[in-house]
Amino acid sequence: MAAAPATAQAATVFPKSHVGFDSITQQIEKKLLKRGFQFNVICVGQTGLGKSTLINTIFASHLMDSKGRMSPEEPIRSTTEIQSVSHVIEENGVRLRLNIVDTPGYGDLINNDRCWDPIVKYIKDQHSAYLRKELTAQREGYLQDTRIHCCLFFIQPSGHGLKPIDIVVLKKLSEYVNVVPVIAKSDSLTLEERAEFKARIKEEFAFHNLRMYPYDNVEHDHDEVALNAVIKEQVPFAVVGSEKNIVVGGQQVRGRQNRWGVINVEDETHCEFVALRNFLTRTHLQDLIETTSFIHYESFRAKQLLALREGGGYSGGSRPISPSADRELSRSSQRMTMNGY
Ligand code: GDP
């Protein structure tokens, strides 16, 4: 057979008339719109840091109730109860199934020894449940995704830096989930204090080698790299939340009324709430979902399959895998061995 000419190059072929496959994007869009999107967020931080308020402010609805104590007589929660609430919110025909996981109790107690365990376990359990469903012989066509796509980590606006417990928890969490740190109640800091606090936290993240979302990715194009550079500069977002509307200059704004004036949550000169909301909902929603799937879940999955291959057994979630899933897991692991993984 004659060898192809060395100069032959892949050429772009234009159809002579309209074939119609350019409608594939509309087809995908229609399918996605019908199915809707699932987004799972976990909020981690001490009680009273404004977690419920911020979530309700971001999604402009009352999605979460405060878990704080309303009076000093109420007992402090002694355990970290993980509670998840689901909502379907719709905007211009796009349905978003939002799962918000609250972790009251973290860091609230005098002895906070291993208080992060239930949170990390919860996140791993979601990966494990997904793996179990994925490996079930007769699995459903569409797997309900409960994997956590984003962890909003609330930092106390102390002006000093991260607490030792924060460092331990951030280290653990960033192994399994996209961590987005926010400085809670940033209205308590002056602009100068805020800038210094931010710089300090950035330094601490770098010093302790804490992984912060967004990550570098060789597949990112020029625009994505530029956008992520802006986000990396902004993180941790210094936010203010409010569920109240206040009239300022004849206009209703989301804000907090103080004796000396109003903090307009949506005013970018007052705080970075809008930047956080845009980042979460407009620019990085899909990337948070994909990064969870391709980085965090993949690494969890690979570890589980390797553990099984090496005879260590399945060690991921707290529940044992079902017998049929176990068989599938062994088969997958055998396939991995055959393929030289
Ligand atoms: P959670 O326990 O972390 O969910 O905290 P909540 O959302 O229940 O908020 C606790 C209290 O802090 C409430 O009285 C809120 O009105 C108030 N709060 C929430 N966000 C802010 C904020 O950004 N600044 C200030 N100053 N107070 C806030």
Image (tube, rainbow, N blue to C red):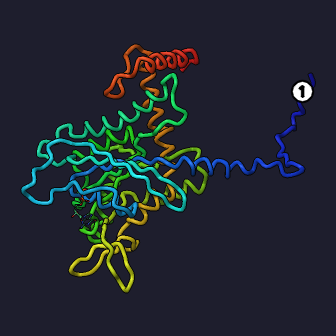
Q: Is mark 1 on a helix, strand or loop?
A: loop
Q: Quadrant location of residue 338? A: top right
Q: Say if 61 sits above or below 144 in the image.
A: below
Tell me: 308 left or right of 7. Answer: left
Towards the viewer: 257 or 196: 257
| Residue assigned mark 1 | 3
Image x and y of residue 333, in percent: 49, 18
Towards the viewer: 82 or 230: 82
Residue beneath the point at 49% across and 19% down: 328
Q: Which residue lies furthest to the left in this view?
A: 73
Towards the viewer: 131 or 223: 131
Tell me: 8 left or right of 255. Answer: right
Image x and y of residue 82, in percent: 27, 43
Amino acid marked by disc 1: Ala
Residue beneath the point at 31% across and 37% down: 120
Image x and y of residue 68, in percent: 19, 56
Tell me: 70 left or right of 273. Answer: left
Q: Say if 109 sits above or below 226 in the image.
A: above
Residue beneath the point at 25% across and 36% down: 117
The quarter of the image that holds ligand 1 is bottom left
Residue 308 visible in the picture: yes
Residue 212 visible in the picture: no
